[in-house]
Image (cartoon, grey):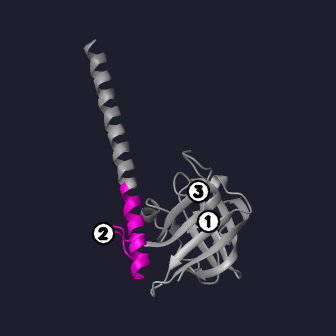
């Protein structure tokens, strides 16, 4: 009987620790999201990149919206594993914002890019960014293709002759333990870059 009580107590303590850890991680993610949006607003005001916290090795570079889905996220610079933990990120190997070529953004399938599961061809995707002169720009894209590819198939991540937006995440969506494929959304400019000033 004493052994059963000890096991029950141990399980209760373990459950409480796991619950507390999950609550901590959720609170940390919420705070990070608030700080990233504040850094984005500061960047728009000054025209200079602002890290969301003092020791951050990234900064907000754009705002990504998919109106039909109500999707609205701030994009961070440099798609490293640490950066992707806090939001969708810009792959430095792709084109820069407002530059010709293939603008590539990546995000996790379980969080930042989970909404891509519901994207359809013809959907609008809006991208907003800024330059050092505090000019804000935006470009509207329309989804042209959605593909599921093997990780080795990087053709859609390479340079492009035309201006395109490529969003990439792992596949399948959700919390499955493996994600052996990649989900790639390709969009073509519907409206060329416009200044908000």
Distance CA(mark 1)–CA(mark 3):
17 Å
Q: Name the residue under label 2.
A: 55
Q: Residue 70 shows which numbered tag? A: 3
Q: Could one spot residue 105 in this view of the protein?
A: yes
Query: Residue drawn 55% across and 67% down?
Result: 64
Indicate the quadrant containing the N terminus: top left, top right, bottom left or bottom right: top left
Distance CA(mark 1)–CA(mark 2):
27 Å
* Number of residues whose C-alpha sits closer than 10 Å to that of mark 3, classed few (under 14), some (14–19) or many (20 or more): few
- Disc with the residue nearer the chain's start (1 vs 2): 2
Q: Mark 1 points at which residue?
A: 167
Q: Nearer the viewer, mark 1 or mark 3?
A: 3
Instruction: Report helix, strand or loop for mark 2.
Output: loop
Instruction: Report helix, strand or loop for mark 1.
Output: strand
Q: Give the range drawn in magenta.
A: 31-57
Residue 82 in percent (x, y) is at 42, 63
Q: Do the residues labelled 3 and 2 touch (CB within 8 Å)?
A: no
């Amino acid at each position: 009987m004493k052994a059963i009580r000890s096991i029950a107590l141990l399980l209760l303590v373990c459950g409480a620790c796991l619950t507390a850890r999950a609550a901590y991680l959720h609170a940390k993610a919420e705070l990070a999201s608030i700080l990233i949006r504040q850094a984005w607003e500061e960047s728009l005001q000054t025209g200079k990149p602002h890290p969301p916290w003092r020791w951050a090795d990234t900064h907000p570079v754009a705002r990504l919206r998919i109106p039909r889905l109500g999707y609205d996220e701030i994009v961070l610079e440099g798609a490293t594993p640490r950066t992707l933990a806090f939001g969708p990120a810009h792959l430095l190997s792709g084109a820069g914002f407002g530059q010709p070529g293939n603008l590539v953004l990546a995000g996790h399938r379980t969080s930042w890019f989970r909404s891509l599961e519901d994207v359809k061809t013809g959907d609008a995707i809006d991208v907003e960014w800024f330059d050092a002169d505090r000019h804000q720009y935006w470009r509207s894209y329309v989804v042209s293709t959605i593909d599921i590819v093997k990780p080795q198939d990087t053709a859609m991540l390479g340079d492009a002759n035309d201006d395109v937006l490529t969003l990439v995440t792992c596949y399948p969506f959700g919390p499955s333990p493996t994600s052996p494929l990649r989900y790639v959304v390709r969009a073509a400019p519907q409206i060329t870059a416009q200044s908000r000033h």
